[in-house]
Image (cartoon, helix red, strand yellow):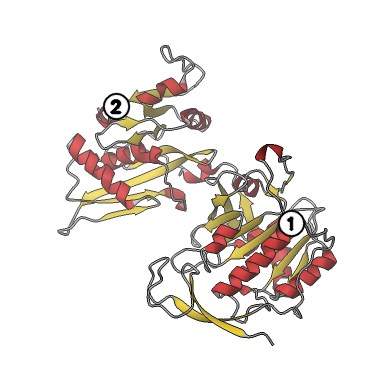
Amino acid sequence: MAKSKTTYFCQSCGFEAPKWLGKCPSCGQWNTFVEEVIEKPNTAIPEWKPAKSSSQRANKPVPVSEIVFSEEDRLITHDKELNRVLGGGIVGGSLVLIGGEPGIGKSTLMLQLALIMPGIKVLYVSGEESERQIKMRSERISASFTTKINNPYILVETSTQNIFKQIELIEPDLVIIDSIQTLHSAHIESTPGSVSQVRECTAELMRFAKETATPVFLIGHITKDGAIAGPKILEHMVDTVLQFEGDRHHVYRILRTIKNRFGSSSELGIYEMQGEGLREVSNPSEILLSQRDEALSGITISATLEGMRPMLIETQALVSTSPYGTPQRSATGFDNKRMNMLLAVLEKRCGFRLSAKDVFLNITGGIRVEDPAIDLGLAAAIISSHEDIPVSFKTCFAGELGLSGEVRAVNRIEQRITEAEKLGFEQIVISRYNLPAAGKNKKQLDFSRYNIEIKAVSRIEEVFQLLFG
């Protein structure tokens, strides 16, 4: 029997210490160290070995000019939204981590992926549900598909050694683990979900994925703070980190890329949760814009970008007199600090007295936007609510607001204009500094190719003069 070793791990960041510490020297959190017993690897414990093991050789340094690079073929799925966030498809040998709140639909998304890939041998490993539960969910999801359904293998197991035995027998093309916090390795004596167990199980799966070029999807739990449970090194080890967001009281779900070694890290996919599973939303602007019969004050439309995807979102503002001594400031889907900055610019540069007003901002659709190009639309919505004058719902905005009141240029303005034109908007307000980028000639610009009226402004005062006279 190997000698046991006791060590302490920080549950917040995974820092290892030989003794208990009150404050973690790595992340600065207090009272996060827990004691775990680690057993040295025993040769009697079976480990995973590749089916076709090559001769062991030591790696040697190679000049970068002599490295032969070939474009790897991606596994294209029938889920276009998942292909988008992964950078064009599943890369062979990649390790993908998907995190999200309980009940948001992570298992449904992965089971749906296993069912819509005909001709691909998929192994779905579950440590949380029984075979009958997975069968019931698969029948409910399959009822909405009109194409041929794949027949994936279901394995209810939590031991990594037993999982690798079945992998050797089946030789799958894709492995899905639900979830990484339920697995345990015989090399570690601590309980499943602990820092050392999560790190060891992820290392074994990563070694398997890289040596066999088999993609592996890991479902991960999150903490009450919204971070993925386990050590922070877990996110560094994997190739791609996806965050499944959304409110369980709304039907729309957002799959956002946090990290991606094989593509852009600013992409997102939108799904609609239905009784039969998740439906892809190909045109998110339709769900983010409410249908109104009359113009209402405090509502504007802003053109934003998420990765390579242009979207038009509805920004709402409510400004009212504060009944208390301290005015309230609240923003849903937008940064509170940036909202305070916009209010200060409007009061300083435009003369609107908002210091004694309650201000509430809302981004419809349940999404969170960090694009500064919606500053202009939010500022127009705030003044529209303050003056109780509606803005035409055929007008949209794309511009960043500076501290001196200038309207700054935003990137890829052509895509924003094209998206607004496609959805039937009659007018778009942009920055004057975007004009050289939008035309072919910097001296003589030609907007005849757009069937939408383009208004260029340089100061926030010009916007209000244009909208409210």
Residue at image position (49%, 22%) is 451
Residue drawn at 39 percent across, 33 percent down: 397
Q: Nearer the viewer, residue 402 or 448?
A: 402
Viewer-side label of 2, 1: 1
For the residue pair 394 and 437, the one nearer the viewer reads as 437
Dot 2 surroundings within 10 Å: few (below 14), some, or many (20 or more)? few
Q: Position of residue 107 (x, y in %)?
A: 63, 64
The image's mark for residue 466 is 2
Tell me: residue 21, above or below residue 338.
below
Q: Which element is circle 2 on?
A: helix
Residue 371 horizontal side relative to residue 80, left or right:
left
Q: CA distance from mark 2 to mark 1?
A: 70 Å
Nearer the observer, 277 or 35: 35
Q: Which residue is mark 1?
A: 58
Residue 396 in the image: state x and y as whole percent.
41, 33
Do we see residue 296 in this rendering? no
In this picture, residue 466 sits left or right of residue 17: left
The quadrant in which residue 322 appears is bottom left
- Given the current orientation, which residue lies at the most extreme top position? 444
